[in-house]
Image (spheres, helix red, strand yellow):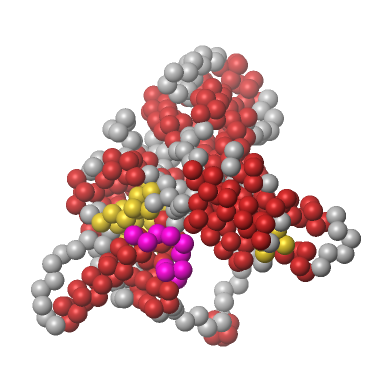
Amino acid sequence: MAQPMTPAAVHKQYDEAMTAFRRQIADSAARVAFGREADSFMRQCACGVWHADQGITPRHVEYYNAVYSKGNPVPTALYWELAASVEGYDRFVLPNFFRQLIRADLERGLSQSRRFVDTFTLMLLLFAAVDGKVSEAEAGFVNACADSMFAYCDQTGVSGGKSGLDVSEFVARRTDGAPVKTGRPEDEAVSPAPAKTAEAKEEAPAEPEPTLEELLAQLDELCGLDKVKEDVKGLINLVKVRRLRQEAGLPVPPMSLHLVFMGNPGTGKTTVARLLAKIYHAVGVLSKGQLVEVDRSGLVAGFVGQTALKTQEVVDKALGGVLFIDEAYALANQDNPNDFGREAIEVLLKGMEDHRDDLIVIVAGYTDLMGDFIHANPGLESRFNKYFYFEDYDGGQLAEIFRSVCKKNGYELDESADKAAAEAFQVMYDRRDENFGNARDVRNVFEAAVARQANRVAAIEAPQKEDLMALIVADLDLEASVE
């Protein structure tokens, strides 16, 4: 059994994690609700964790009273009060602030509610470990709560998927070294899938990899991004000439291919990063060419020492390809010198040095914040010296993206709808503010139009193929889109 943490250490980790997450909440109303309600909710969940483990000690009272964040009242529960709360714990209920996070995510095209599930999971594991171990029953409770929250994100349509955080990694191990089961009922019912035979693998040959010319054609097909396209092609030429110099026995000066992508959300940063990974593979810079995309929650854990392990796993997964870190500025918390994000940065820098011939890192985020991030560590400044700026799409480009999305999904705009959409997207661009989502806003308009079109077509007695494909002005509801 590991040495239990002190209540002071539990409070420190809890306060830092919750404060860091609260600062990242973009919506002010959701941020206020989180600050007001989160501590109480997390203490209820601590009771649920300890209820699953069947029993508490007077020592648990000190840990319970340590669960509060800066600026909020400090709890003063007594043993009999806590014992009654743990014994009487009923069931997990989604908190109001989480529902507000969901609404804010849907309005802004974000996925902060999904990130909270990671923070929530790590905090519950922190509560479970106050006695020096995370038991099978506690892990089962944590998994069930996290699954419930992810399921609600899926149900409401929040973008993104379930994180790669594996609760079983924290579960105490048996004396034979095997991990303890997580305690979820479905674990007992599912048998391991049979391994694929060599014959089965031969039946599904891998698709041929795209050529450099095909990848550059895909880059050219992207709407806008003229400066980015020019920069990418210049980078490719530089790589090609370096390789030719190497083959000719000429000296090749050291060069960093790590990149900084700066710009607002929805400007194509991830799409370009994915293409760049394949392009680097096509010209022989990378051995595989895969893209591994993460943000702070995919690198930073809530326990001392766990961040290094978590970040190293991501680096290992990205070897041979590109590691794309979105909103990378969240790793550099200038207000807290002990933030675990700094540990993640150090591991990243070491990975970039150890694997400089087969790993490329692209960091991305808002222009002003990315400057602060790069200057937060001298190692970052020396490795990231190429900057790509992704400008906002203008009204005409937004309209072109909308037409492309419609065509790709089998919808057709009549002349009136096309004209109305173009005018509306120009207004959207002219009125843009700090919450402007670029292509994400276009996607929201498209999805809303498809929903309204479905309601309209469902009322037609025998709709034809043309009816199923047609989007008209009434389907677009463009006045609401530009408000």
Q: Position of residue 161 (x, y in %)?
A: 56, 52
The one nearer the camera, 10 or 299, is 299
**Relative vertical location of residue 90 with respect to residue 181 in this rendering, above or below:** above
Farthest right residue in view: 461
In this rendering, position of residue 148 left or right of residue 465: left
The image quadrant where one finds the C terminus is: top right
Rendered location of residue 443, percent (x, y): 58, 53
Is residue 129 in the magenta section?
Answer: no
The relative height of residue 346 versus residue 9 in the rendered view (above or below) is below
Residue at 70 percent of width and 53 percent of height: 473
Q: Is residue 51 at least partly visible in the picture?
A: no
| Most common secondary structure along the magenta stretch | helix
Query: Which residues fall within the magenta stretch?
Result: 218-227
Instruction: Count numbered badges in the picture.
Output: 0
To which quarter of the image does residue 337 belong? top left
Residue 410 image position (x, y, % from top left):
67, 67
| Residue under the image location 39 percent in, 27 percent down | 12
The residue depicted at 44 percent of the width and 18 percent of the height is 71
What residue is shown at x 52% (from left), y 83% (from top)? 205
- Is residue 223 located in the magenta-colored stretch of the structure? yes
Question: Which of 174 and 252 lies nearest the eye of the viewer?
Answer: 252
For the residue pair 106 and 70, the one nearer the viewer reads as 106
